Image (cartoon, rainbow, N blue to C red):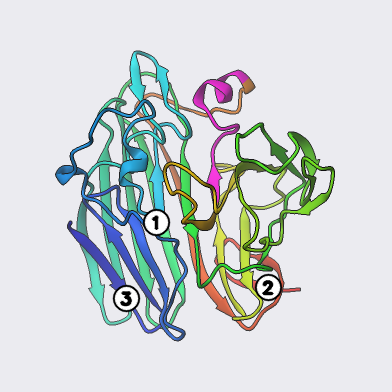
């Protein structure tokens, strides 16, 4: 597959251009640790894979190798809307993106990526910027409606984290008020609305969602973190004193989907995975139909655009984070 590699003294970023522009590697070079999770199924080229039969949820899982996806025009289970139809997690994570290097200088490199949806008249442009000496990736995005119609959409950033970065006791800091738990077949949590981060499990024992559980846990669940004071989170491995931070505009992404996948048996990973993802999103809960009903779905006006910026960074030497600024600066507690 065509691959984009951005690299400085601190970070190595690898993006799969032929498969959704997935960031398949976010490596902190001084410790040689890749923070992303990688599925045991590996990364598959959609143009060279033959499915044995059509899957009711669409092909996303067949091609999901882990890493970080940019997901449009829907997120969650498949949907039918305005005559179009999509499987799990829409289109943009499955199709090829164009890429041009627009700046390659000793102190900075900038790559421009773009894609047009097949079944919805949306175009997404984004720029990756990496500067000398910074453990910080800046992502600038522009979503364009190329029709005259106002269109509903769901936009999800889907970074998944795994070992060795992710470990039992890893801490999540996020300025949130509430977490929404829905019924889920392999969930250990009680459905309802709860004050972040404490949630009762099905045995009425308290679970602290701000700490990654032991490796004995067997569960898969997606929760929805809401009531954000600001758009940021920090994930800190206490043993490594290594952390990942993300900062974004909460006016664009007011919710964070929290996917936890701990040793879940059966298809698709058959107990071989231990990972989690914290995913800024425009909408909740987990299907387009429910988002429309809950009126959390945004609209983009005809012949207009939405611009936003994301800062993704690595920090060291901290055990707890007070804040990450919109500029990507980490403030210690």
Q: Which residue is mark 3?
A: 7
> With 23 as the anchor, is 300 left or right in this view?
right
Highlighted magenta segment, given as a residue range: 278-293
* Disc ID at residue 331: 2
Residue 59 is situated, as x and y percent measured from the top left of the image, at: 31, 36
The residue sitting at the left extreme is 48
Residue drawn at (79%, 41%) of the image? 194
Would you say the residues marked 1 and 3 are in contact, meaning their CB atoms lie under 8 Å apart?
Answer: no
The mark nearer the N terminus, 1 or 2, is: 1
In 3D space, how far apart are the residues under numbered discs 1 and 3 (Cα atoms)?
23 Å
Q: Is residue 254 left or right of residue 100?
A: right
* Closer to viewer: mark 3 or mark 2: 3
Above-or-below relation of 194 to 279: above
Residue 27's place in the image compared with 232, above or below, is below
**Tag on residue 39?**
1
62 versus 53 height, above or below: below
Q: For the residue labelled by badge 1, is the local secondary structure a helix, a strand or a loop?
A: loop
Callout 2 secondary element: strand
Mark in front: 1 vs 3: 1
The image quarter containing residue 128 is: bottom left
Residue 286 spot, x, y in % from top left: 55, 32
Disc 2 residue crowd, few under 14, some 14–19, many 20+, Cα 10 Å: few
Dot 3, how many residues are within 10 Å of its Cα: few (below 14), some (14-19), or many (20+)?
some
Residue 222 or residue 267, whichever sits in front = 267
């Amino acid at each position: 597959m065509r691959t984009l590699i951005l690299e400085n003294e601190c970070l190595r970023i690898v993006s799969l251009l032929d498969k959704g522009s997935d960031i398949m590697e976010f490596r902190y070079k001084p410790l040689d640790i890749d923070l992303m999770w990688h599925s045991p199924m590996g990364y598959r080229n959609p143009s060279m894979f033959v499915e044995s039969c059509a899957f009711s949820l669409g092909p996303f899982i067949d091609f999901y190798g882990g890493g970080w996806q940019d997901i449009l025009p829907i997120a969650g289970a498949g949907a039918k809307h305005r005559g179009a139809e999509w499987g799990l997690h829409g289109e943009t994570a499955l199709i090829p993106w164009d890429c041009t290097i627009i700046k390659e200088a000793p102190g900075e490199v900038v790559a421009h990526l773009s894609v047009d949806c097949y079944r919805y008249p949306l175009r997404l442009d984004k720029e990756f910027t990496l500067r000398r000496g910074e453990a910080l990736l800046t992502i600038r995005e522009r979503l364009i409606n190329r029709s005259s119609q106002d269109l509903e959409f769901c936009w999800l950033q889907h970074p998944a984290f795994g070992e060795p970065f992710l470990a039992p006791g890893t801490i999540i800091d996020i300025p949130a008020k509430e977490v929404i738990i829905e019924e889920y077949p392999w969930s250990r949590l009680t459905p309802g609305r709860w004050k972040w981060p404490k949630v009762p499990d099905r045995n009425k024992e308290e679970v602290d969602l701000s700490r990654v559980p032991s490796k004995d846990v067997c569960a898969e669940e997606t929760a929805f973190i809401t009531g954000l004071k600001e758009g940021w989170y920090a994930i800190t491995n206490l043993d490594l004193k290594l952390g990942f931070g993300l900062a974004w505009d909460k006016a664009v992404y007011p919710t964070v989907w929290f996917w936890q996948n701990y040793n879940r048996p059966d298809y698709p990973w058959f107990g071989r995975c231990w990972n989690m993802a914290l995913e800024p999103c425009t909408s909740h809960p987990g299907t387009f139909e429910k988002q429309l009903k809950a009126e959390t779905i945004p609209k983009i006006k005809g012949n207009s655009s939405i611009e936003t910026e994301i800062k993704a960074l690595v920090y060291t030497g901290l055990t707890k984070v007070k804040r990450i600024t919109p500029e990507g600066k980490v403030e210690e507690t």
